[in-house]
Amino acid sequence: MVKNKKGIPRLLAYAINALLFFVFLGILNSLIASGIFSSYYVKILMLIAINIILAVSLNLATGFLGQLPLGHAGFMAVGAYASAIFMKATPLPNFVAFPIGLILGGLVAAVFGFIIGIPALRLRGDYLAIITLGFGEIIRVVLLNIDSVLGFNFTYGASSLKNIPKTTTVTNAFICVSIVLIIIHTTIKSKHGRAVLSIRENEIAAESCGVNTTYYKTMAFVMSAFFAGMAGSLYAGYVGILNPSGFAFMKSIEILVMVVLGGMGSMIGSVISATALTVLPELLRSFSEYRMVAYSLLLIIVMIFKPSGLMGTYDFSLSRIIGKCGDKISSHLRKGKEGRR
Amino acid sequence: MKKFISVALVLVFVLSLFAGCGSKTPASTQPATSAAPQGGTGTIKIGVLGCTSGDYAQYGNAVIHGAQLYIDKVNAAGGINGKKIEYIIYDDKGDPTEAVNAYNRLVGNGITALLGSVLSGATAAVVGEANPTNMPMITASATDAGVTYNADKKLVYKNVFRTCYIDPFQGQKMADYASQKLNAKTAAIIFETGNDYAVGLKNAFIAKAKANGITVVAETAYSKGDKDFKSQLTNIKAKNPDVIFCPNYYEDDGMIVTQARQLGIKSVFMGGDGWANVYKYASAADLEGSIFCSSYAPGSTDEIKKFEADFKAKYPNETPNMFSAQGYDAAIVLLDAIKAAESKNLKVGSAEYKQAIIDGMKNTTSVGLGGKYKFDEYNNPIKNAVIIKLQGGAEKFSEVF
């Protein structure tokens, strides 16, 4: 068995993670079933899950790949509409249709990510930001006006796509979040992930070392789009009504704020800031008109005192912590034994 | 120091993660206490939802203030059956996601009925939540047909009512008015693409105009935020239509009329209730003779005069408009239905009580500012349109059509 340099045996780590996953799922479900979590908390939890997926997927392109795409809401919109239209049309029962819709939403968004990624990723920095920004707007305008081009009701444009089956539950949202986190985490820790990180650090150096930069840039970008599409499908099943105006430029910025606030290149940072930025406006609801001011102030303060984001590039590793604790305990025991001698 | 502050900030964020769980205790115990059996005294909780901030805040504030005016009046007179009406107002910013969250929070607060929301999109999102639990709901301003009717399943949402017209109704009325009263033979349309209100009115107008034998010679669109309409208007001018249907919000309408007159277009402008307050956005001479339909005729009856006086007394900085009148009417219909439910001696907040409120609204006999209310099979009010004509820079009540 391979032993990690720091931490504990990999199999044990997997077992602990799987156990924690089921324990959390069990706690969540029992809280909801017992009625301690009202429908309000359930809704907020779902929204948190959706925002975590959005933030972590954007972090893949922003924090790990080092690009600045501003069209994340566009991918989300594509995924949301694809899965919503499928869910409305399909005769399949919900528990079969839901995963299909989820993957369909992701795939359609990934296709769009691929199409836009190939020309866009030849550019850098501001230029990439502008081209993805433009793409996001194109998606929104197309969704708005495609019906009059097609001549039949497809996205229902401005009058909103209504009556989407509300299939998103806390359980399936939680499972989706876990899957997304696992996939992104393992990708980043793999050979491919190291290639992606090398592009972020220095693209020319990476290329000269034989990293196929175009391939890895596109891969990370398409993955990011896929998960955004998945988040979009969850969102469609959460809110039940889709309007293109909800996927405007500001939505992309909101997601980017979550990533930057949490720390670019830190998954735990994205998770924390996505959760906090979803919960905060709700907590501040009783302040009513001041809540947006308080919220903005908090963002400014964080950026002044911690410009690298709350977590910087730190990432949380349970096995590392357990391993460190284990080391400390064992060294302590050893010292104790030595002392007695 | 810096490090201390950043650590403190991280703590704030982490705590806010748990704060969601921490603050649940009071919220979840509230419904339990309000569900306790009550005698003749106590309160009836209702939720009020609307956009009090954001782009459409002036609609939301007008509706909510109108509703507040009536509810406060009822409370001052002793409430219903000795019970005061307690209302909780939440802002949804006109956003469906916020509306869904705010609605669920209201449910957590133990509301018995909902007045809201204000914009169609947000209201439709709330209906998706409220319909499965049969929550009585009345909106004062959501004009989209889909708010009370599920067109996919051909199902009427039995718990949802409204006191405003639906979009198609206004478009049809204006097409009828154009052919019957103005003897129009040709019409042009300029509308904001991507605005569900404008598109809804436009589609209904075109369908009805064709049936009435009016030729639609031009159908031109502009985008949200446009300030220059000259290219669209030049196109319309070449076709020289009898009437121009302009079913947009007042600010754009004012600019369109001004620019049209500059280009020398003489056609009569027609619009929907979004035209209310247009007189602030174009000159009296340019607007002269323009027509729009509304559900509110300022100063036309004694009740309306009284409402206007009361409204100005309570909110000195605001002018009562159609939205506040509809909010006032929505509160009347809802409170009358609650009165009917109270007479059945049911427990406040129970499923039977909610059903009784819904039945009360369905068979309403309330008299509001817009006349006597009666709902059709789609829970839309059956009422006539009020035609408003712009004369000398003022919006004058012309006739009921």
Image (cartoon, coloured by chain):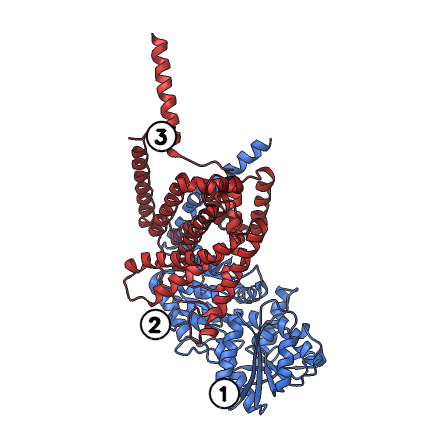
Numbered circle sitting on residue A49: none
Q: Colour of chain A?
A: red
- Secondary structure beneath dot 2 equals loop
Q: Secondary structure at mark 3?
A: loop
In this view, the mark in front (2 or 3): 3
Earlier in the chain: of badge 1 and badge 2, it is 2
Q: What kind of residue is marked 1?
A: Lys
Q: Which residue is mark 1?
A: B210
Q: Position of residue B228 (x, y in %)?
A: 66, 71
Give amino acid for label 2.
Lys
For the question of whether residue B259 can be seen, the reply is: yes
Q: Which chain letter goes with mark 2?
A: B
Q: Check disc 3 and report the residue beneath it.
A: A4
| Residue B352 percent across, percent down from the top left | 33, 64
Pick the front one: A111 or B76: A111
Rendering quarter of residue B182 = bottom right
Q: Are marks 3 and 1 on the same chain?
A: no
Gap in Å between the C-alphas at discs 1 and 2? 28 Å
Q: Quadrant of the C terminus of chain B?
A: bottom right
Quarter of the view holding residue A39: bottom left
Establish if A7 lies above or below A53: above
Q: Amino acid at mark 3?
A: Asn
Task: Name the subunit of mark 1.
Answer: B
Q: CA distance from mark 2 to mark 3?
A: 57 Å
Name the residue beneath numbered marker 2: B153
Q: Quadrant of the N terminus of chain B?
A: top right
The image shows residue B158 at horizontal and vertical percentages of: 37, 71
- Residue drawn at (46%, 58%), measured in percent from left and top? A115
Q: Is residue B116 visible?
A: no
Chain B representation colour? blue
